[in-house]
Amino acid sequence: MRNAIDNVDEKIIALMQENARINIKDIASQVFLSSPAVTARIERLERNHVINGYHAQINPEAIGYSIKAFINLDVDPIQKKELYPFVAACTNVIECNCVTGDYSILLEVAFRDTNELDNFINDLQKFGRTKTQIVFSTAVDHRNLPI
């Protein structure tokens, strides 16, 4: 179910996606509302989980993570109770998705080198069969969704 957002909310979201550090006063001037009105709208968008958080976008290579990979994992449903805490505890796991197809889990991971990746895959294989793809380059990085 889509949350009810109007054109002003869409403009606020677009401005914040462009620059999450934009100040309320600047947003207010661009949407022709008072600062308290903009603050109230942002709080409502947060409460309704339209806005889930604010993050610094980090370049992984700049902090030593030169290996990005996608790991497919074929895991029995009963093992998910064990798997989810395992991957949640691994800070190298960027994202974990339950998917359709030949494999039931798709992980996005980042590691400093292939030895670290290999050790993680070895640990992961206690849950099931894996298939790993190491990323050479990224043509389209994570981006904002159109409003």
Image (cartoon, rainbow, N blue to C red):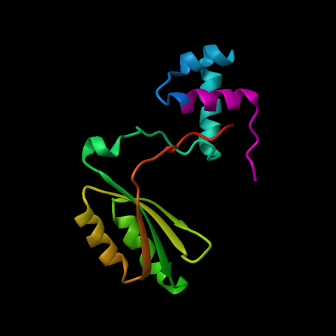
**Image point (36%, 76%), residue name:** 124
Quadrant containing the C terminus in the rendered view: top right
Q: Main secondary structure of the magenta part?
A: helix
Q: Quadrant of residue 91?
A: bottom left
- Give the left or right position of residue 143, taking residue 85 as reference: right
Q: Was residue 143 drawn as part of the magenta stretch in this picture? A: no
Give the magenta range.
Answer: 1-17
- Give the left or right position of residue 46, taking residue 96 as reference: right
Q: Quadrant of residue 61?
A: top left
Looking at the image, which residue sits at the far front? 136
- Residue 37 in the image, given as x and y percentages of width and height: 65, 23
**Image point (35%, 41%), residue name:** 59
Q: Is residue 114 above or below residue 17?
A: below
Q: Is residue 2 above or below residue 115?
A: above
- Residue 98 in the image, given as x and y percentages of width and height: 56, 69
Q: Was residue 2 drawn as part of the magenta stretch in this picture? A: yes
Q: Is residue 86 visible?
A: yes
Q: Is residue 34 visible?
A: no
